[in-house]
Structures are given as structure tokens and as C-alpha cells.
Amino acid sequence: MPLRLTPSSANISTNIQAAITQHLLNTVGVNPADATPNDLMLAVSHVARQQLSQRWVETQTREAAAKARRVVYLSMEFLMGRTLSNALGALELRGAAAEGLTQFAQTLENVADREPDAALGNGGLGRLAACFLDSMATVGLPSFGYGIRYEYGMFAQDIQNGAQMEYPDPWLENGTPWEFPRADISYPVHFGGWVEHVNGSPIWRHAGEVAAKAYDMVVPGHGTEKVSTLRLWKAVAPAHIDLNAFNTGDYARAASLKNEYENISWVLYPNDSTPAGRELRLKQEYFFVSASVQDLVARHLREHPSLDNLAEHVAIHLNDTHPAIGVAELMRVLCDEHAMPWDKAWKICGNTFSYTNHTLMPEALETWPVGLMQHVLPRHLEIIFRINKEFLDLAATHRPGDNAFLARLSLIDEQGERRVRMAHLSIVGSHKVNGVSALHSELLVQTIFSDFASIWPDRFTNMTNGVTPRRWLAQANPGLSGLLDSTLGSGWRLDLDQLQKLKAKKDDAAFQKSFMAVKRANKVRLAEAIARSTGIQVSPDSLFDVQVKRIHEYKRQLLNVLHVVTRYQAILANPHADWVPRTVIFAGKAASSYVTAKSIIRLIHDVGTVVNNDPRIGDKLKLVFMPNYGVSVAETIMPGADLSEQISTAGTEASGTGNMKLALNGALTIGTDDGANIEIRQNVGDDNIFIFGLKTPEVQALKQSGYQPMRYYENTPALKAVLDAIAGGQFSPDEPGRYRALVDTLLWGGDHYLLLADYASYVATQAQVDDLYRQPAAWCAKAITNVAGMGVFSSDRTIREYAQQIWHMAPDAL
Ligand code: 26W
């Protein structure tokens, strides 16, 4: 039994030093005197792993004994980032570990930096899942996250000549200390074939089988000994496949067959805007859902005599529609494998499932061609047809004779190639459906799901997103955390509402001074990171204006660039005016096939090259793009930001969570009336946020009345000058036509996201930002007020709401 290290145990740092040395010798296999930072990262990780392992076993034992009700969170993506620092934080061993490392002449920061990010996700949806796991463990909710153990996560982004290049992310190449392979937990997952009906009973004669093997990652709770589990599935060819080919000596065929099966968990689809529509993606979805359902059913049957009471003991949550096939899978397992009558199974299903929608963008809604579904999952397609028939019979009673209504509701889109609508399957199979901000949830029932809401008004609800204050404040911003600890005590980590008490301090000169010193140090750190990753020197005295998120037209990074060019031209026209120095910082990945998004990245670089090297500009304006945005890069950026850009077209950003992380770290928001920005405004107060642009109803009205972007171009001289400069090649002299197409999407392509309509309001609001920044004390008071108002955006609050209103569970019941 390894020593149990607790922060209160005597000589904790001596003990940790001994434990690190032991792991260097026994686990890593190096001479402690020669240990590299990477060796130390592994050794410290193993020290923490051992402690967490004990907690894991205790939590599991307690939950099994109590036959606890559990939530099962199904998600194709978990953007976990690094684990070491978070694990040490949860164990309250960060200080001791840092001290222990001094013996090896290393800092904890430098050692922790060696760990690769677990980037098993694209963006907001995946990071939300990771924040939720942290909160579920912390509030003591018996829970399992289930996903895929991708061999390759989100691609690594490199910039060459201003253009994005994608590289594979072999994050498991050197192994990871954080996973526990569960050799004895493996389930067969079947594909293809056909269905026979024998005496009225369906029998799925599948054509292929792959094994799903479990790899667990421990999710530590904070301020509690409870831990939760993220169980990731790896696809492995069934043994008999290789054997047959091996026995006949056909090794090439054996290898290629093995590949065909194992490629299922090979790589994350790096797209968060348009579904891939590929057979492999459908197989990924079914693969992890089937394994997870088998696992939860097996666990239930270990604790209970039958599946009759499944819904009382399990809540299954669908993180978007990617796991929606789970509805059909649970029906198949209950009816076909456990001989449960359909109606009874359907009730259980509805009581078990719930579904979160994360986007209103119609092109992002998943549908699968009926032919493909027939080919990959023939029995599930039959089940979906039956669900659909019974659902449409019910719907017809609501509006007899209204066939258009039924066609809109149907699980099958009959226009053109027939397709299964996964959102419809999710809604029909769930007892609750939620959006992720107040506005988004409202728009769901008014627009894409209005027909469903007319049948089931009570099924739809809101769960405003949140972020974990442990990673996004305690870990990412030690400076501010220390200040909060000395001002408020340490309780804010578990009760973020305590930040409210900062309001009283917003004009306190001494507190302001400390607060600004923290921000300044974080900006220095960020400036160093910028210099390392881009070679560009920026001044920590300039206003750090930050837009970090996936590159997408609706998020309008291009509008930000239009403002940068506007400012550039204005400085040149009026060099001696009292300009507030600004550093505009971008980061984010574009989907590899998203041509316009990639063009925006290139434009940012081209404009940066001109602006940053113009001697007439100096520090008045700098433009940088930090490559390879991900969780760890975000942890450096969030604490150093002054201004948070949340400038999506009103009605398009479901929630946003970067907006929360930035405000929590003391940035002021410039944003549209969209997503969670609206709730941030309500919580920090109208005077402490810069809201501009058209509101959602105005966007809708403008589009309806026939939006003409050319009018804005003709009537706004500054805008015309900016667009002419970009389109005319001023920033791409080597290829003057490089941005013609990009500008044409605005002028001639309809400017779908209304950049030109919002331009004037945006630029005017940016001038207000400058005015405020000229008054440091006034700016600082507002920044403090922002931090003070962010308590409600803790993911602990979000998870408690899910637990109470959707999953019907009491946090901390055990
Ligand atoms: C199938 C292709 C695909 C994959 C992922 C389409 C759409 C997605 C996600 C739904 C995109 C996503 O990450 N959405 C973001 O979810 C966050 C968490 O709720 C929100 O804060 C963001 O506003 C939303 O864009």
C-alpha cells in the first residue's frame, strides 16, 4: 500500500521528494540525478495517480454498495487538456510538489508543461464536457463520462507563410500516466449484415464485430475525496479475425483487416460546423454508444435483478446528437436482448435519456442517409422506423390532416435522398431537451424545434453553460487566485458566488493596485508566450484585445480584422492623436476543409505583417495570431486579456464559454446581444460591458426586409476604404487578388452574418473601449465588477441544475 499523502501529513514535501525519487527509479526507470523535466513530469504524475487511484477505488466501492443512481454523460468529445496540475490541485499537493521539485532544480510549471494536452475534442462542446466532469466529481454526483480513446486528437496547427497547416496529434505516442487500461472490460460491437424475423422476433445477422476495450481516466473532485470516471473506448479487432488470416500465412491481409476494425477509434473528426457524413463517423458514434450502453446495463444487472428499474438508477445524457443512436440501441438491448415488451422499453427509454443541443446552425444538424444507416445498422433503422411511426401517429392527433406538420416532425427527411434526422430522434427519445443559454433555449423552441415544442412544451428547458473555476481561475491564474484568497478566503473555489464580495472593493485603491499588478504580471507572461510562439514582441502596456475560439464566419473574426484595418488607416491619417496602444490577439483552428475560415487566418497574418512592420505605427497597434489554440494555450491567454471579443451575429452563438473564462479573469467584454453574453451583461451590469450591434429580432427583420450589404459599403467611407484595401491587395502585394473572394462573400455573396450592418456600431464601441482604458481606475473598477459578477457561471451551478431538473439526482447524496 503506497503512502497516503495528505496536505496535513507531516513532512509532506520530504515525503513527496521520496515518492518522486521512488517513481523515477521504479516507474520511469532513470537515475534521479539525471532526471529530465519530462522524467519528472512522469514521476510526479505517478505520485498523484497513486493517490487518486485510492480515491477512485473508495468512491466506486461506496457507489456500488449504495446502488447509487448515476448519470452517464455520452460525448464524442472531451477536451481535457493537461491533467497533472489539476490533479495536484485536487489533492491539495500543488505547493508540496513544487517544493519537492526544487530538489531537482525544477519548477512545477516547467515540469507540468511537458505533458501533452489530451485534445479529444474540437471546441466548446468538448471543453464543456470536460468542465462538467470536473463539476460532477466536485459536487459529488455519481457519474461516468463515456467517449472514444482517439489515438489522434485534434490536429496540431502550424502556420507557414501565414497559412494554417495541419499535423497529426499523436498524444499517446509516449504513453500517458493518466489512463488505467481495464484489460477485463471489453464488449463486442456489431455492424452491418441484415435482420431476419423468426417467429416475429428480429434477429440481427451482423456482418462484422469489433471489440471495445475500456481505458479509464480518473476525474478528481476538488474539496472532496470523491472522484469520477471518464471511460474511453478503444477499438480492437476481435482475436479470431487475425487468427484466421494468420493461420493461412496471409499477414498482409491480417494487417489490413485489423486496420479496418481498429481505425474506428483512430482519429477525432476535426470539424465542428458541418457533419462529416462519412461511414466511419457513423461507426464511431455507434461504437462508443453501444459499448457504453452494454457497460451501464451490465453494471445495473450487477446491482439489480432486472432492467425494469433501469430508469430509476441511470440518467443518460446525450451531448448533442452525436450519441443519439443510443436511443435505438437501448431499445434494441431491452427488446431484442432482454425480451422486454416495446411499450415498456419505450417508457424506460424516455425516462432515461435527455439531450442538449449546442447549435442552431442548420448546416450543423446531423442527418444520416437512410441507405447508409441500412448498411451499417440495419436493426437500428428498423427500430427508428417504428419509433417514427408511433410518434407520427401521436403527432397526427395534435393537428389532424396537417401533413406538412408531420413531414417537418418526421425522423426521416423525405426531401431528396431520405435521411434520418438525429436531432428528432434525440427529442422524441428524451424526457428533457435543453439549450445552453437563455437566448439559445428560447430560439430553439421558436425556430428549429417549434413543432416539437407545440406538442411537448414542457420537454424544453434551459441550462446555461458554465466553466470550472478550478482550471480557469485557480490553476490558470495563480496571481489572481492568491489575491482572492487573501481578500475573500479560499472558499470561492467551491462556491463561486463568494466573488460577489469583491464588489465592495471595486474602488478600493489598495485592492485596485494589487488587482492591476496581477493583470500586468499575467500580461507579461502572455507577451512572453506570444514572443515564443510568433517571434513578435508586444508591449504589456498596450490594451490586450483577445479573440480566441474556433475560426468560423458566424463568430466574425473578419469583423475584428475590419476594425484592425480601420484603426491602422486612422492612425496613419492622424498619427499624432492620443491613440491607446493595442495588441490584438487571435487564436483558433479552422476546419481543414473550411476554405473561407482558412482564408481569414491568412488575412490576419497578412494584415499583421504589414501593421507590425510599419514604422509609423510602432506600439500603437500590433496584431498577432497565436498558433495551435487549445486548452493549455487558453490557460495562458485568459488571465492576460483586457478585452474579450464576443462578436458573433446575434442569434448564432449558442452560448460561448470562452466569454465566461475571460470575464472571470478580469477582461471586459465587447460583444453582441448573443448567447451567454446576454446573461453576462445581466450579472455584471450594463455599465460594465460593451454591447453593440443588431439584436436578434433586428437581425431577423433586416434579413426579411432584404439586406443589401452594398448600401453600407457605399454609405460608410471608412468601411469602403478598408474593404478596398483588403480586396485590392494592400496586404497581399505578392498576390493582390488573394482576398477578392473573401471580400466578395460580403459585398456580393449576401454577407450572411451581417458584418457590414454591424461595422459602424462595432467601430464606435471600440472607441468607447479606448476612452475607458485611458482611465485606469475606472477600467479597473469595471474589471473587478466583472470578476465579482461571474459566480453564476461556475459549471458547479450548471451541474446542480442538470442534477435537479433533468437527471433527478441529489448532489452529495452519498
Ligand atoms: C457534426 C458536426 C458538428 C460537431 C460539433 C457540429 C456541431 C458541433 C458542436 C455542436 C459545435 C460546438 O462546439 N458548439 C458550441 O457548444 C458550446 C458548448 O455548449 C457553446 O458554448 C458554443 O456556443 C457552441 O458553438
Image (cartoon, rainbow, N blue to C red):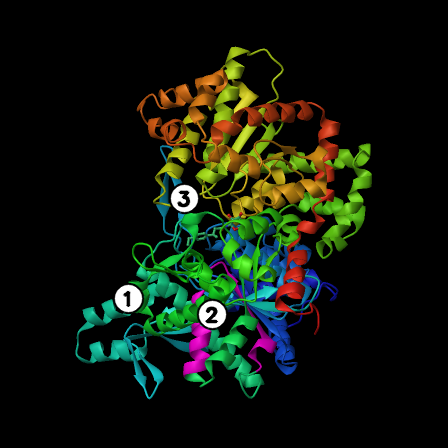
Q: Name the residue under label 3.
A: 157
Label 3 Cα neighbours within 10 Å, binned few <14 / some 14-19 / many ≥20: many
Identify the secondary structure beneath mark 2: strand
Q: Name the residue under label 2.
A: 215
Instruction: State whether residue 229 is above or below residue 131.
Output: below
Image-based side of 176 in relation to 640, left or right? left
Instruction: State whether residue 739 is above or below residue 264.
Output: above
Report whether the residue tagged 1 is closer than 8 Å to ligand 1: no
Specify the amino acid type for callout 3: Gln
- Magenta stretch encompasses residue 328: yes
- Magenta stretch encompasses residue 666: no
**Residue 530 x %, y %:** 51, 35
Image-based side of 214 in relation to 132, left or right? left
Can see residue 81? Answer: no
Can see residue 161? Answer: yes
Identify the secondary structure beneath mark 1: helix
Q: Residue at x 59, y 23 (%)?
A: 764
Instruction: State whether residue 806 is above or below residue 276.
Output: below
Q: Residue at x 30, y 68 (%)?
A: 374
Q: Give the range drawn in magenta.
A: 309-336
Circle nearer the N terminus (2, 3):
3
Q: Are marks 1 and 3 in contact (CB under 8 Å)?
A: no
Circle nearer the N terminus (1, 3):
3
Report whether the residue tagged 2 is closer than 8 Å to ligand 1: no
Q: Are marks 2 and 3 in contact (CB under 8 Å)?
A: no
Looking at this view, is 433 or 797 the one in front? Answer: 433
Mark number displayed over residue 259: 1
Specify the amino acid type for callout 2: Tyr
